[in-house]
Image (cartoon, grey):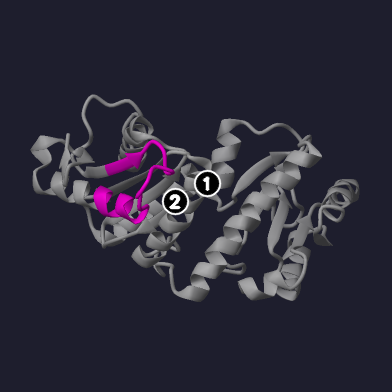
Amino acid sequence: MSSARVATRPPLVLIADSHEWFSRALETVLVPGGYRVVKAYTARGALQQVEASEPDAVILTVDLPGGEGLNLCRLLRADALVPPSTPIILTQPAPATRRQTLAALRAGACELWGQQLDAEELLLRLAAQLRAKAHADHAWAEGLVDAATQLYNARGLARRALELGAEARRRAAPLACVAFALEEDGGQAAERVTRVLREAARTSDAVGRIGPREFAVIAPGTGSDAALRLAERLAGALTGRPRRVAAVPAEFLAGYDAVPDAAVPKFDPATLLAHASAALAAAAHDPAGGRIRKYENGAGRA
């Protein structure tokens, strides 16, 4: 759905749950919060509503009859029955375990909610997901998205760096960029990065593909030490190694740069992406000097 269409009317949320009482409870929270609601009670009904109403967000119960929520979520994602930017949220009656949350994320859901979620928290979480959708829809309209991964392309990431930099400047907050690469086939690298970042990236982060095997994350509220930790976490997640590793895996390279206060005079957020990319290039040129490099004085250093 285009961002222009979303802007002309309140967002539409599809609630697919076999329990009428829960659908009504959600509706009493969403409608006063500025949303429109359509409901379905089976997997077949949910598919029909998706086709007929083109919802801006989908809320599915895990135990939905006639297809169960995880499988329906996979179907919606795999067959592109909803746009990639449309948030799909799974719900269940009990608090979610880590294993259940990971299963939901791997199925393509944005979140897994327990049904005891506070009403105000529900609205804030949904609003955050729809803000991300609006950014993504706008990016599609402007040609700022990499078609293969659904991540920002280099142009889109540069645009988001300027937007996030302006916000960080207003708040006098830190801002960082981590550029990284996997030394494997470009298609395999793209698939792995997309899968991992779907599970790991924060909603506030801007993630993009800047080359065949190269990617970058613009991370608001992140200083230099936190940027290094982010690179280390990415190394572990993308290579299947423990989060704390004695040495960065050989197939992973990264460069990063950060500013502790984006309100400092003459700070240009576009330089963060350029500096992180330069540090990544330095690591690629001489990996023996450190597979994760910090940008400093025109060059990356270990």
Circle 2 sits in a helix, a strand or a loop, which is it? helix
Q: Secondary structure at mark 1?
A: helix
Question: Is disc 2 surrounded by few (<14), some (14 to 19) or many (20+) residues within 10 Å?
Answer: many
The residue sitting at 27% across, 55% down in the picture is: 214
- 124 in relation to 99, above or below: below
For disc 2, the marked residue is: 165
Q: Amino acid at mark 2?
A: Gly
Q: Nearer the viewer, mark 2 or mark 1?
A: 1
The residue stretch that appears in magenta? 256-276
The answer to whether one can see residue 27 in this image is yes
Q: Which residue is mark 1?
A: 170
Residue 40 location (% of width, % of height): 81, 61
- Check if mark 2's residue and mark 1's residue have beta carbons within 8 Å: no
Q: Give the quarter of the figure containing the C terminus.
A: top left
Residue at the (43%, 57%) spot, across then down: 162
Identify which amino acid the numbered label 1 is placed on.
Arg
**Residue 196 seen by the camera:** no
Q: Is residue 204 magenta?
A: no
In percent of width and height, residue 142 lies at: 48, 74
Left-right relation of 4 to 243 = right
| Residue 260 lies in the magenta-colored region | yes
* Residue displayed at 21% across by 44% down: 251
